[in-house]
Amino acid sequence: MTLLKPSDRRERLEKIVTAWWRWYAALGALGCAAYFVVPTTVWGQSVFALVGASAVAATVVGTRMHRPRNRSAWLAIAMGTALWVIGDIVYEWIHITQGSVPYPSPADAIYLVGYPVYGFGLFLLARHKWRPSERGHVANSAIIMVAFGLLTWVFAVQPSLGGGGISGTAGLVDVAYPAMDIFLLGLLAHFVGSRQWRTLSYRLLTVAVALLVVTDTVNNFAIVSDSSSDRSVFDVGWIMSYVLIGVAALHPSMRRITNPNIESDAHLMASFTTPTVVVLTAATLTAPIVMFIEVVRDEPIAQWGWAVLLCALALVVLVMLRITDLLRLLHTQTVQLRAVAGTDHLTGLANLRALEHRLWGNAGESTLLTVDIDRFKEINDTFGRGLGDQVLVVVAERLRGVADDSILLARLAGDEFALCGASESMDPAALAHRIQLLFATPFEVGNMTLLIEASVGVASNSPGDGEDETTPDRLVQRADLAVQAAKAAQSRVAYYDRSMDRDKSEQLIMLGELTTALETDQLQLHYQPQIDLTTMTVVGVEALLRWHHPNGTVLSPSTFLPTAERTGLIRPLTSYVLTQALAQRRQWMTDGLELSIAVNISTRNLFDDTLIEQVCTALKEFDCPPRRLTVEVTETSAMTDPIGATETLSILHAMGVQVAIDDYGTGYSSLAYIERLPVQELKIDRTFIGGMAHNPAHAAIVRSTVELARTLGLSVTAEGVEDEVTMTALRELRCGRAQGYHLGRPTSADRLPALVAELNAHLNTATGERIS
C-alpha cells in the first residue's frame, strides 16, 4: 500500500471538501422535491425536519472545516436554525398526538426564541467596529424596518386582532412574529449594504434570509393559514431557506466573510448607492401611501391614524439624519479632493496648483524661490528613475527644514521645488543661503551617498517692477528665468531682473529664425585649411558653420549654437553639417582634390543616441572613407560624462572615424583624462598658440603637450597660427598640423580649391627658400 505524503493527503481532502457544497445543494434540491412528493403529510413534515437538521449539521461542519474568523456568528446561525427545526418537530408531534395544534403552542415559543438567536448570528456577520459612519447603515435599516412595520401592522396584524388591540398571549404572538420579521428585514438591509456582499457565501445567506422573511410575511398576511400542518407551495420558501443556509456554510468563500476594516467615509459612501437610495425613497413614501389607501377604503382613522403618524415622524427624523450624513460626506470629500488636487503624490508637498492658489490669495507682495536640482537627468540616466524618485523625496524632506509655517513648500514639476511666502516676512538672500548649506551635506539615498547640488532663482511680484499686476504664472516664470540664469552663470543663486525677459525673448526669436534658416538655406559651411607641417601641404579642412542672416550679418556658431543645444534643433543642425561637408568633399574628389574633413559636434550631440546613425548614413551616402572624417569634441563636453562619451567615441573609432579633442587646454587640461578616451588627435587651443612668441609659459605648455601627446601616440594640431614665427616654432617642436589665418582664412566651398593651390605653391616656395 502506497502512503500519501501529508501535503498530498491535505490537497486531496481539500478537493473533497470543496465539492461538498455542490453535493449538499443537489441533495437539498431533492429534499425540497421529496417534501411535496411523499404520500402523507407526516412523511412530508419528516422530510421538512430532516432538511432543516441537515442545514444545522452543514453549518456546524462548514464552520469546523473552513475555520472562519467569525465562527461565533455561524454557530449562532446554526443554533437559531436548530431551534426552528425543534419547533417544527414539536409542532408536528402535537399535531399527531392531539389532532390539532393550539395557538399559541410550545412550538411558537421555540420559534420565537430562534429568531433573535438567528438574527444575532447575522448581526455578528454584518457588523463593523462602531464608528460614526456605521450609523448610516443602521439608519437605512431603521427606515426599511419602520416602513415594513407600518405595512405589516396596518394590513396584517391589526386585522388579525379584530380591532380589539393586543390582549392575551395570542395577541402578543401575533405581534411577535411580524416584529421578528421586521428585525430580520433590517439585518437584511444591512447585509446588502455591506462590502462583504462580494463573497458567494454571503449572497447565499442573504437569499436564505430573504426567503425566510418573504415566506413569513406571506403567512402573516393570512395568504396561507397557519393553523394546520397541510403542505403548501409557499412552504418551499422555508425549506429552501434551510438548504441555502447549509450551502452558504459549506462553500469555501465563507472563510473570507470577515469584519472588513474600511475607512469611515468609504463605508458611509457605501450606504448611498443607487439601489439603496431607490429602496429608501420607496420606504419613505410608505406613510402617505398607506394613508391614501386607508382613506380610499374608508377605514376608521382611529384604527390606523396613530400608526401612520408615528411612523411618518420616525421616517422624517431618520431621513433628516441621512441627509445630514450626506451633506457631511460631500463636505468631507470636497475637502479631500481639494487636498489631493493640491498635493504632489510623490513627495507629499504642495503642487503647482496649490502654489498658484496661495499666490492668488495673497493680497500683498509675494516672494518666490525656485530650487532646481543640478544634473538630475544624469542621476536618472545613471541609477534609474526609481532612485531618482528617492532623491526627490529626500530633497523634499531636507527642504522642509527651511520652510516654516509662513512659507509654502511645493514641488512644481520634475526636479523643481519652490518656496513661497509674503515678502515682508521673508529674507530671500538668507533663505537661499540656508538652502545652499543644506545641499552642501551629502544625501543618503538607499545604500548610496550622493553629493547633490542645486540652483536657486528668486523673484518677487513687486509693484515697482513697472507692471500693474504680476499673475502667479508670471511670477513662477520669472523665478524659472532666474534659476536658468543661476545655472548658466554657475552662481548657484540668481535674482530676477527684467533683462532676463529680453534674453528669453531674444532666444525664442532666434530659435524661430534658426528653424527658418535651416529650411531656406541661410546656413552655409566655410572651410579652413589644415597644413601638414612636415610636408607643408594642405591635407584637410575644418568645416565651420556660418549663418547668413537676412539682416545682412554673418553669425558665427557661438551666437546661435547655445540656443540650438537647449532644444531639439541641434540634431538637424548636426545632420546638415555632416551632409553638406561630406557632399562637398565628394565634389572636390571629383575635381581631383582629395582632402580630409573635420566637423565639430556639441555636448548634446555626443550623448545623442542618433549620432552614430547620422555618421554612418552620411559616410555611406557620400562614399567617404571613415578615416577621412574627423569628429571634433571639446574636452569639457567629453568630461561631462566620461563613461557615456567613451562609449560613443569608441563606436566612432571602431568605424574608422578619427576623433579629436578640440580647444585642448581650456577645460580639464589633463592628459590623465584624455588618455581614457579613444581619441587620435589633440587640437591645442589658440590661446596658447598665439602667445608662444612672447609668453614663455604658453610656449612651455605647447612644448610639453606636443611631447606628451607624441608619447601617447596622439597627433597634434595647433589652432590660431597667425604669423610665420609661430609656424616656425611649431615645426621645430615637430607639431603635426596647424591652421590659422596665416595659413588660410575660412572660405566658401567654391573658392577653396584655388586657396589650396595658392597655399601649396606658397608653402613649397617658402620651404625651398629656407632650405637654400
Image (cartoon, rainbow, N blue to C red):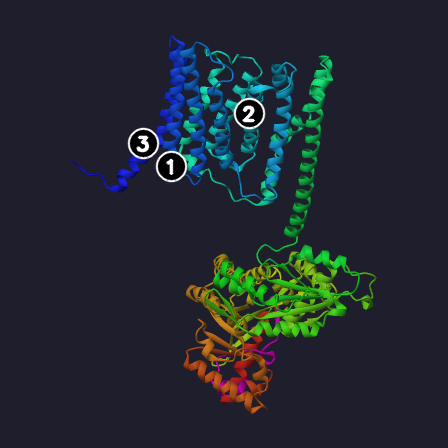
Secondary structure of the residue carrying numbered label 3: helix
Residue bearing mark 3: 16
Q: Is residue 736 magenta?
A: yes
> On screen, 589 above or below 41?
below
Q: Residues within 10 Å of mark 1 (few under 14, many from 20)?
A: many
The residue carrying pointer 2 sits among few (fewer than 14), some (14 to 19) or many (20 or more) residues within 10 Å by Cα, namely: many
Q: State the residue in front, 643 or 190.
A: 190
Give x and y (percent) for residue 34: 38, 14
Q: Residue furthest front?
A: 168
- Give the spatial CA distance, label 1 vs label 3: 13 Å
Q: CA distance from mark 3 to mark 2?
A: 37 Å
**Amino acid tagged 1:** His
Q: Residue at x 54, y 28 (%)?
A: 184
As drawn, 55 above or below 295 = below
Give the residue number, with chain letter if any, for mark 1: 66
Q: Which residue is mark 2?
A: 181
